[in-house]
Image: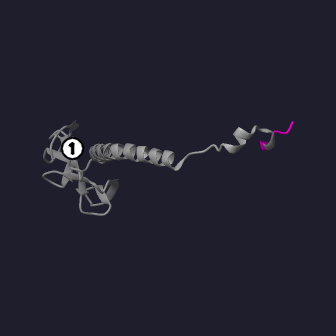
Amino acid sequence: MNASTYNLPLKLRTTSSGFTLIELMVTIAVLAIIVGIATPSINSQLANQRVKSTTATLANALKEAKNESLIRRQSITLSYDNNSNPKMINITDADAGKIASYRYDSKSIIKSSKTSIDFEPSKRVDAAITYTVCDKNTSIVPRQVNVSKLANINIKAGVSC
C-alpha cells in the first residue's frame, strides 16, 4: 500500500516538523559557550605535550650520542640550536661528520649553560649539564634533563624556567 501525505488526517498535514529559528539560536549559543570553556584547556594540553615531546627527543638524542661514542670509540658531540628554523638537535663525530639530527617544536625552548656536550668513549662527559625544556606558553610546567659526569641521563618534571 502506498502511503502518501494525502492519506494523512488534516491536522498532521498542516503541522510542519522542524526547528524554529529560536531553537537553532539557543543550540548555537550553548555550543559556543562549551567551545569557549574548552579552548584554554586544549591549548594548555597541547603546550604540555610539546614540552614532553621535546624532552623525550632531547633524552633520546643524548642516549644515542652516548651509545655512538661507545660504539665508535671516539668523542661524540651533541648540540642544539634554538635560533634555527626548524629547531635542531645535532649529533656529530670528532671529524665534524653529522651522525644524526632531530627536529623539535618551534614553540619549545631548550635552556642550559652550554649548547653542546661531548660524550667520551670512557662513558663520561666533559662536564655535567642540566637542560631545561620550556614552552613559549609560560604557564606550562617545564621539564629538566640532567646529564651527570658519568653520562647518566635523568628526566625530572616540576622545575622552573
Q: Position of residue 144 (x, y in %)?
A: 20, 42
Give the magenta part as a residue range. Answer: 1-5
Assess whether residue 2 is covered by the magenta stretch.
Answer: yes
Three-letter code for the amino acid on which mark 1 is drawn: Pro
Q: Report the label total.
A: 1
Could you tell me which secondary element the residue under label 1 belongs to?
Answer: loop
In this rendering, position of residue 78 left or right of residue 21: left
Report the side of 98 relative to 154 (left or right). Answer: right
Name the residue that disc number 1 marks.
Answer: 142
> Picture coordinates of residue 11 (x, y %)?
70, 39
> Residue lying farthest front?
10
Main structural element of the magenta stretch: helix, strand or loop? Answer: loop
Residue 106 falls in which quadrant of the image?
bottom left
Q: On the rendered image, what quadrant is the N terminus found in?
A: top right
Picture coordinates of residue 102 (x, y %)? Answer: 33, 53
Where residue 51 appears, x then y in whole percent? 28, 46
Q: On the rendered structure, is 44 left or right of 132?
A: right
- The residue lying at 43 percent from left, 45 percent from top is 31
Q: Is residue 67 visible?
A: no
Inspect this view and state whether residue 62 appears.
yes
